[in-house]
Structures are given as C-alpha cells and as structure tokens.
Image (cartoon, helix red, strand yellow):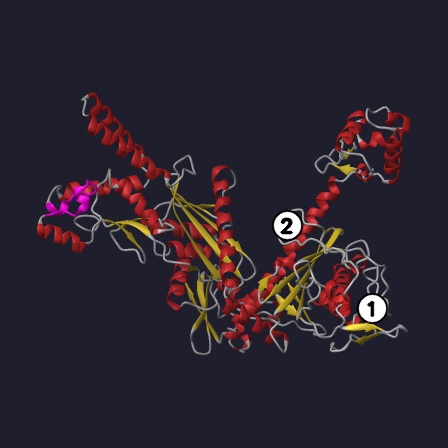
Amino acid sequence: MADPSSYRPKPGQIPDSPGVYKFRDEHRRVIYVGKAKNLRQRLANYFQDLAGLHPRTRTMVTTAASVEWTVVSTEVEALQLEYTWIKEYDPRFNVKYRDDKSYPYLAVTLNEEFPRVQVMRGAKKKGVRYFGPYGHAWAIRETVDLMLRVFPVRTCSAGVFKNAERTGRPCLLGYIGKCSAPCVGRVTPDEHRDLAEDFCDFMAGRTGTYIRRLEKDMTQAAEEMEYERAARLRDDAEALRRAMEKSAVVLADATDADLIAVAEDELEAAVQIFHVRGGRVRGQRGWVTDKVEAVDTAGLVEHALQQLYGEEAGDSVPKEVLVPALPEDPEAVSQWLAGRRGSQVSLRIPQRGDKKDLMGTVQRNAQQALGLHKTKRASDLTTRSRALEEIAEALGLDTAPLRVECFDISHLQGDDVVASMVVFEDGLARKSEYRRFQIKGFEGQDDVRSMHEVIGRRFKRYLQDKERTGEWEETPAGTGPVPAPGATAPVPSAAPSIAATPSAAVPGPAPVLAPGVSPAATVATHAPPSTGTEPGAPAPTEAAPPGDASEDTREDDGRPKRFAYPPQLVVVDGGQPQVAAAKRALDELGIDDVAVCGLAKRLEEVWLPDDDDPVVLPRSSEGLYLLQRIRDEAHRFALTYQRAKRAKRIRSSPLDDVAGLGGTRKQALIKHFGSVKNLRQATIDEICEVPGIGRRTAESVAVALAAAAPAAPAVNTATGEIIEEDDGGSTP
C-alpha cells in the first residue's frame, strides 16, 4: 500500500487552470482519470488525511504511485480529453457502464448504390442511417415488414442481390410486392434511393405526409372506380398506422429528446435511456455499473452522457437531453453536446407536464433493471457460495454461515417502534420464517435497547424449543437443566427462562405452564395474522395441545417450528452500539455459538463485537453484496410493518373497543352528535336517544370514551391553527 504523501506534487507545481489528471500505479498502469475546472484545488482533495477520504477514494490513492495532469484551455476540452483517456486506458477505478447485451438498430445503408434496410449491431458505420436502439431484433423486423408494403426498399444481402442480377430473377419479396426489385431493373437507382429516403423520413417521425398522400390516392382511385387499387392503398395506410402504434406517442409537441434516469444503491447503479423522436419512443437501452469510485447521481449522469454521445455526431445527438440531476458543470457538458451535434443542445431537468411524467416512467424502468440485475446475481449458485465463503473468511468463522438472521428496528420519531427478523438460508430468502416484533419493554426511541430486547426475545424462544424437544430437562429440585439421554450439552444454568416481561432476564428453572397453554404466549411477540398486505409475513404459531414434547415442536405439516433452528450468524442493521447490544443479549442467555456482526449503512462497514475498528470488505465483494441485500430486506420488512401499524393506529377510534357496537351504529352515533368530541360530552340519556342504542350499549360507550384520553390537538402546518376534533375520525 503506497503512501499518498510519497508522490504528492510539491506546492506550486500544480496549475490552477482546467485540465485532466490521471493516477498511475507502481506498474505505470492508469488506474483513474478525472477532470477539473481547477487542477490545484481538485488534486489537493486527494492528498488530505486518509481518514477523511471516502473508502473508494482512499483505496484508489493508496493503490496509486504517481499522478500526472494535462492542462487544457477550456472545460469542454477537458470533458472531451477525459472521455478519450477513459476509452483508451480503461482505468479500474472509473465508473464503466456495461451493456447487458448489444442493442440492435434499424439501419439504412445510404452509402450504397442501392440502399438496404437491415438489423445492425455493434459499432456504427459512416454513411448509414440508424434508428433505435430497440429492445429486440424481432421488433425491428415486425416494423420493417409492415412498412415494406409502402416503401419496398431492398432488404437482401449483397450475395442474394448479385445472384438475382446474374439470373435476372428477383427474390420472393420482389414477386409479392415487398421489394421494388432494383436487382432486375424494375426501378432505377435514383427511384430506389427516393424510396429509401422516404423510409427514413417516416422513421424519423414525419409520418403525417405519407398517410395523407395514401388517403388522397385511395379516394382518387375510388372515384375512378379502381376499387382494387383503392383497397390496396387502404391496406397500405393501415399498415403504416400499425407501424406507428408500435411506438406510442408520449410527447404531444413532436419533441426530439433523450431521457436519462438513474437508479442506484451503495454498490451499483443502473441507467436507462429512452430515445424519443417526433414525440414517440423510438428506442430504449440501459447499462449497469459497479460504483468503484466515489460518485453521486450527477457524476453518474455525466459518465452516462460521455458514453452515450462520445462517438455520436449530427442528428444522433438530440436537441434536448432530460436528466434527473445536472452534472457538476452543466454549461461545459451542454457545449460539448452542441459540438457533437453541430447545433444547440438543451440539457435540463424536467419540472412539470408530460416530460416529467415520462421521466418517472424511465426512472421506474431503471429501478426495475437494477432489481433484475440483483436478482440474477443473487440466484447464481456459484456466486452465493463464494459470498458465504467470503463472509466466513472476513468474520473469522469456522464454516460458511448457511443460515443468517438479520434484525432491524423501525419507528417514526419514537412512535410505533417495531422490529423485523428476516432469514436467509444458503444465500436465499426464507420468507416463511420472517418474524415481526413489537417493542414492549419500554416506550420511546432507543434503537440500542430495542435491539437488545428483540435479540433476547428471539433466542429465549430458541432455548425454550430446545427444552421442549428434550435436549435438556428440569430436575425436581429446580437445580437447573440437565441433558436428556443422547442430547447435546446443556445451556449454562445462568440462561434465563421464558418470562412474561420480554426484556427481563430471570435466572432459574423454566416456569410451569398450565395445561393447554402454549409457551408462545409468554415470549416474543410473533407476527400478527397476515392481512395480505405483506408477502412473506407468517401467521402466528397456534397453541399446541399438551402431549409429547417432540410433537409440540412440529408444525401441522411436520416441519420444525420457526424458532427451532439457530442461525450461524446474526446480522444487525447498525454499527458498534447495536452489535454490542446484540452480543450482550446472547451472553445473558449463555449462547456463545452464534456469531454476531453489524452492517453500518453509511460506509457499508462490517462491525464485530469488542473490535474498535470495522472490517472493510472490497466494494466488488460478493460477501458484502449479500450482507447488504440481507440488511436491505430486513429494513424493508420492518418499515412495511411499522407503516401498517401506524396507519391502523391513525384509523382507530375509542368506539372500536365497545363490545357489540358495529359499523352501522357507530355511524349513527357520529351522525347524531357530529364528532367524537361531542359524543364524549353527552350523557347516557342523550346517547340512548340515538335509534338502535340501548341503555347498556350507551353505558359501554360512555365508559369507553371516558377511559380514552383525548388526543393532542392537531395543528395545520400551513396556517399554524389548531384543528378542532370535529370530524368523525372513528367512522368505519
């Protein structure tokens, strides 16, 4: 590892003008290329204290052995030179977008004597007109097949064309009217070129002229009673309309624009581009990249613009480019794009209207592309195996953690505090074993204390399941558990039994339960019955009847209960405090065979108990990717539960606790009194005046409203006024 101070330029050596710089390693290979308005200020950022650098930047400067720079006159030249060097040197620490595939284009070879329409991939050629890219080659062929009725341009290869010239017979398309057969002289080269140019004009968006011309010719043929010709022209016009329908109108003002959207996380980013020509989406493409350098959304956009238009010129660069975030120097980038196009290019963020709506669609496509990429990566068996091995090596585990449980805490300013537990086995999610917890040991916001409570509750249940399976038994004198014949070694006697208070650790023998009472009633809160709103949320375990202990630990289908298996690794969402709380909970229960680590979101550092420094996995590590995916899934599951719980609380009413009071009579009460506030102030006799409300029900309503404390007054954040409780908030 090199010390950046060993190759730091001397003060005054670096100019303060625009330029491009490159870092080289000890083998003189270029590992990073960047540009700057002011080289002196930019390079100074790389030679500060290593602790203050982003982890990716820190890795780069410690890998490098020298730095060089080239001064240019303008920022546009710097942008162009940066792109050229990135293409030439392929530096390992620069963001490089990679296509999932080579996107096909619809190409018209105007550089030939008889232009040809075909599907083309790869590098673009001079003199060829391109349309697209398209997602699939068959989409191009369908469009061409429809348009050849009206524009019978040559589509055959050079060999087929020369063979037809030699034999004097056209191919099949020439016989069925889908080729003008220039190979046998049916049309002159100039006439065929006119057909090809008309084809290009239609594909470029100038569609109305040709459809109107066909309709005019159709009407004229009908008037002259040439009905067969009129029918053929009608079919031609319909074919063009069907070809137009394959690219929907998205912008009514016939705009030519490219829309670029970015979806990213801490490790990867996906870019999606929609090519809109004449107000219609004419093509779509996308890239995925590893974030090997410290780059934000604006930087990703700038890299995408360089890759997208670095080799383009003329009309291939549209008049307008819409992006989610402007690059660091938007004026320089706009000038560079204008130089590629040969005229002014507008680079901006859409603020309203159809363009903003379309940008939302492109953004959703980018998010879906990133999710699909992650799914493909996670589903690969070899990749999962390598990820588990990397985790085991980084954490010092004896074996790969085949079962990993991750815990996360979620709340809104200390209210509705909940936790989640997600399970991954062999690198894949086991949603049937996900659990959700309500924090009941205390009120308020304390993520560390909440994590301690949840870990304790989960593993108390695990110890109870071990006890019921016969792995340890209670002695009559209450001297602690002893192993059953053939069972594994017992948990130390200091391990607490299952108590009704989740966060209390009470030493001693397990409590004696009444017949028919499931121990599940005395331990961690299970996920409530699934309401269909959260896939993967399991239903609570039913109370098992008394009987054989081995049967008590089985589900109805014979599978072990969800807390019966211990994980090899517990992951918590957080840093050193959360990890210490989880480890303390395990120590209190006498569990020492479960590894614990935490993943801090800001820098994606892995924390271990009793370690002052985190474990930093490489950004390209499959192990880090798996840990991140597990942590994100726990966060999603907890957040979904917290939002559902909060929504249920907001919709709740004191009248919900009144036995026998249904929705119809609730509405009648609110309609009669106008609000819950007025109903609370009413007497029992006044409540009895409501149709359908008897005295016993009225007394129950009065008791329920008296017991429920009035909610704090709501405040209108726009005006600062206090909103009176005059809505029926309790109306079902």
Q: Three-letter amino acid code at disc 2?
A: Glu
> Residue at the location (89% across, 73% down)?
476
- The mark that comes first in sequence, 2 or 1, is 1
Label 1 belongs to which residue?
A: 496
> Is 644 left or right of 289, judged from the image as shown?
right
> Residue at the location (81% across, 61% down)?
503
> Is 299 left or right of 116, judged from the image as shown?
right
Spot occupied by residue 374 in the image (x, y as percentages of width and height): 52, 59
Label 2 belongs to which residue?
A: 534
> Residue at the location (17% across, 53% down)?
160
Q: Three-letter amino acid code at disc 1?
A: Pro
Spot occupied by residue 655 in the image (x, y as percentages of width and height): 81, 36
Seen from the viewer's position, the closer of residues 118 and 175 is 175
Vertical position of residue 116 compared to residue 409: above or below: above
Label 1 crowd bin: few (<14), some (14–19), many (20+), radius 10 Å: many
Spot occupied by residue 186 in the image (x, y as percentages of width and height): 12, 41
Q: Which part of the image, by quadrant, shows the C terminus?
A: top right
User: Is 599 colored magenta in this rendering?
Assistant: no
Q: What segment is highlighted magenta in the picture?
A: 169-184
Spot occupied by residue 420 in the image (x, y as percentages of width and height): 69, 57
Label 2 crowd bin: few (<14), some (14–19), many (20+), radius 10 Å: few
Spatial separation of the CA atoms under disc 2 and disc 1: 33 Å
